Amino acid sequence: MITSASTGVDTKSQDYLTHYIDTQAWLPRNIVIVNKEAFDKLTATEKKALTDAAKAAEERGWKLSVEEMTIKTKALKDAGIKVLPPSPALKEGLAKVGATIASEWEKSAGTDGAAMLAAFRK
């Protein structure tokens, strides 16, 4: 079963699991998407206000994500589930799978996709 601590708590995983390996694979991402044509029509002040609001939302989102993960991971422990960090072998395996997925996506996404992936990796 691959799940987040939140879903593990919500589905009462203590009824069927004894261990939870905390890979932190399901941390929410907060994204603001705008239409480029509409964004380009904004004034410099409006663009700054929008990007500042997006940055503030991202910071708030990360803070809330960490809070949620901390609370729900504790709830798993309190329910009797042994919470463990991923082993080095698991980390290595997940990294290989992630690299394969990213590589395949990059090939299918073209130059724009490659540029997005390069920016993400920074």
Image (cartoon, helix red, strand yellow):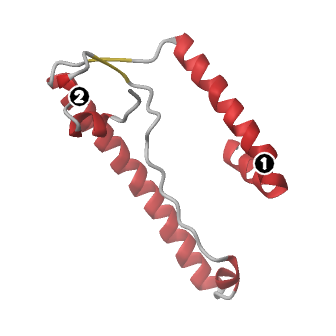
Residue at 60 percent of width and 18 percent of height: 93
> Residue type at mark 1?
Ser
| 52 shown above or below 74 | below
Residue at 28 percent of width and 33 percent of height: 8
Residue identified by numbered label 1: 108
Q: Nearer the viewer, residue 120 or 3?
A: 3
| 20 shown above or below 43 | above
Q: Is residue 101 left or right of residue 15?
A: right
Q: CA distance from mark 2 to mark 1?
A: 37 Å
Residue at 53 percent of width and 78 percent of height: 49
Residue 47: mark: none
The part of the image, by quadrant, that contains residue 45 is: bottom right
Residue 79 on image: x %, y %: 15, 24
| 101 shown above or below 65 | above
Q: Earlier in the sequence, mark 2 or mark 1?
A: 2
Q: Crowding at label 2, few (<14), some or many (≥20) Cα neighbours within 10 Å?
A: some
Which quadrant: the C terminus? top right
Which quadrant: the N terminus? top left
Q: Residue furthest right?
A: 111
Residue 13: mark: 2
Residue 3 on image: x %, y %: 37, 33
Residue 97 on image: x %, y %: 63, 27
Residue at 72 percent of width and 47 percent of height: 117
> Residue type at mark 2?
Ser
Residue 105 on image: x %, y %: 72, 44
